[in-house]
Structure formats: structure tokens, C-alpha cells
Image (tube, rainbow, N blue to C red):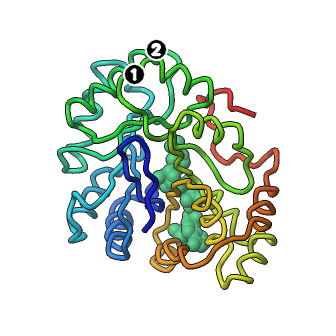
Amino acid sequence: MQFVECRGARIPIIGLGTMTLMEDVCVEAVKAALQLGYRSLDTAEKYGNEVWVGQGLAESGVAREDVFLTTKVDLRNLASPDFERSVDESLEKLKVSYVDLLLIHWNNPEVPLADSIRSLCKAKRAGLTRHIGVANFTTTMLDEALKHADEPLVANQIEVHPFLDQSKLLAKCRELDISVTAYCPTARGNVPGNETLERIGRTHGKTATQVALRWLVQQNIVAIPRSANPDHLKANLDIFDFELTDAEMAEITALKRPDGRVVNPPFAPQWDT
Ligand SMILES: NC(=O)c1ccc[n+]([C@@H]2O[C@H](COP(=O)([O-])OP(=O)(O)OC[C@H]3O[C@@H](n4cnc5c(N)ncnc54)[C@H](OP(=O)(O)O)[C@@H]3O)[C@@H](O)[C@H]2O)c1
């Protein structure tokens, strides 16, 4: 496993996404992933599955301290004291005393960033999380957040895959020394079957999904593909024995298209273009 290092955080470059995984499917996916060598799990208050993620972790036989565990505070709970209650409940459901990364899941324009970022920093100082970060933050939101942060923000979790142009936001994260975690790294199932990715994959003996994940990893971007399929879980880790050429990297980057975004709920911010 490779790691992305950022301001004291050491984040496994591949983690397991768990959105929509519930009950036994979730428990079994988490256990299978950890037994295969995953050391990072991504959940959120909003997913309603922290209890099963925690159960999978506990039953996996892998030590808690060896796993990088991320959860997120829902946008309805960003104002104090909801924020603090939300974090306590997440820890209780996960059955852990701390998470490794606590994120603001989506900004809520009705709660000043000064307040939500202060609560995030407070959670870190209280030892409830080892690191803090944000998700779905744009370039302007990152600038604003940093004005209020007196603890380092180590990650911005955003949608990144070959069909979406995130160049402006990626450059901003690099400039600010904030690591990027790519959600929907397989564009939620749109990567398999893509002709270019399949062709590049064939030259390396890999699938289109593995090529898309490798494209992220070669940019030092953390990826958290979700799967409940043991073969896919294994394949998504098996991306460290080949290298995409500069020409292949450029060809994949050129797959971006204007309608490439997968996640765009009504409460999303004005995205960077
Ligand atoms: N911060 C946010 O706002 C936010 C938003 C969205 C997602 N996320 C996080 O990011 C994670 C990943 O995003 P996502 O779940 O939306 O999308 P994704 O990981 O791009 O796509 C998941 C889909 O890809 C399939 N898949 C995975 N590996 C595969 C493989 N090797 N070959 C073929 N199909 C494969 C899975 O099916 P199988 O189960 O059949 O493998 C599943 O249907 C989420 O689970 C969540 O933890 C965060």
C-alpha cells in the first residue's frame, strides 16, 4: 500500500468507500476489504451505516490503530451543539474512541464557516479525531475555511475521475498543501466499458477500473472505490504493479466532458469550472 502524506497525516492511497452498503452486505464488505489488505474505510453520518462499518472493523481481526477511519458530519449538524452531538454519535456507532479523519460532508451556507471550522478544530483538539478536513469544498470555500482553521486541514474529498475536469480545484489543493481524496473514482460504474480505458488496460493486462484508479494514484490522489464484490475489492487494490506512461495519463485526462459530474445534489455549491 502506498500512502499520501499531508501535514502529519499518512493516508492509505486506496480506501474502501461504503456509501449505500448496509447491514450484512456492509459488514462483510468491510471485513473482506480489511482481510485483503485495505487499511482505510470511508463512511459518513449521512450514510446511516456507521454501525455496520464499525462491526466489520471489529470483526475483521485487524487492529483498530492499523486502520485509517474517516467519517463526516452531515450538513444539518454543522452548528454547535449539533456538531458535537453528531461526532459523539458517530464514534458511538463506530464503537471507536476516535476517527482518523473527520470531514465536513457538505458546507451549509446557513452556518458560518467560522463556526463549523471552529467545531472541527475543537474535535481534533479533544482527541475525537486525529486529523480534520472537508469535502465538496470549492476553491473559494477552501480559502475561506483556511482563514478560520487553527488546525491543519489535511484533505478535501471531492469527485474525481477521468470524465470530470477538476484541474482548477486540484491545482488549488496542491497550492494550499491539502491532499485530495477522489470519490466516485469509477464514475459510479461508468468507467467499465469505456473504450479508451479498456484499450489502455489491455496493454497492461488490467481492467478499465484499474486504469482509472492508477490514473488517480499516479497523481498522488487518494481513491476510495466502493465495492461489495470480493473480486472487485481485490482488483481495486491490484494497481501497484504497473505504470501508465505520460501519453496514457494525458489521453485519460482528455476523457473529461462537460456532463461528466455524477454527484450534484440541490445543496451543492457553485462548482469550480
Ligand atoms: N463526500 C461525498 O460527498 C461523497 C459523495 C459520493 C461518494 N463518496 C464516497 O466515495 C465512495 C465511492 O464513490 P461511489 O460509491 O459513489 O462510486 P464508485 O466507487 O465510483 O462506484 C461504485 C460502483 O462501482 C462498482 N465497482 C467498484 N469496483 C469495481 C470494479 N473493479 N469493476 C467493476 N465495477 C466496480 C461497484 O459495484 P460492485 O459492488 O459490484 O463492485 C459500485 O456499483 C462512496 O462509497 C463514499 O464512501 C463521498
Q: Residue at x 38, y 57 (%)?
A: 41
Q: Is mark 2 within 8 Å of ligand 1?
A: no
The percent coordinates of residue 6 (x first, y second) are 43, 45
Amino acid type, label 2: Pro
The percent coordinates of residue 164 (x first, y second) are 73, 49
46, 217: nearer the viewer: 217
80, 98: nearer the viewer: 98
Tell me the quarter of the picture where residue 220 sits: bottom right
Tell me the CA gap for discs 2 and 1. 7 Å
Above or below, comparing residue 121 to residue 244 in the picture: above
Above or below, comparing residue 78 to residue 56 in the picture: above
Give the quadrant of the N terminus: bottom left
Residue topped by disc 1: 116
Q: Which mark is residue 112?
A: 2
Instruction: Indicate which quadrant contains ligand 1.
Output: bottom right
45, 112: nearer the viewer: 112
Asked whether the residues under the numbered discs 2 and 1 touch, taking CB atoms below 8 Å apart as contact, a structural biologist would say yes
The percent coordinates of residue 2 (x first, y second) are 45, 64
Q: Residue at x 55, y 51 (%)?
A: 183
Q: Residue at x 69, y 71 (%)?
A: 244
Mark 1 element type: helix
The percent coordinates of residue 188 (x first, y second) are 62, 58
Side (left or right) of 183 relative to 27: right
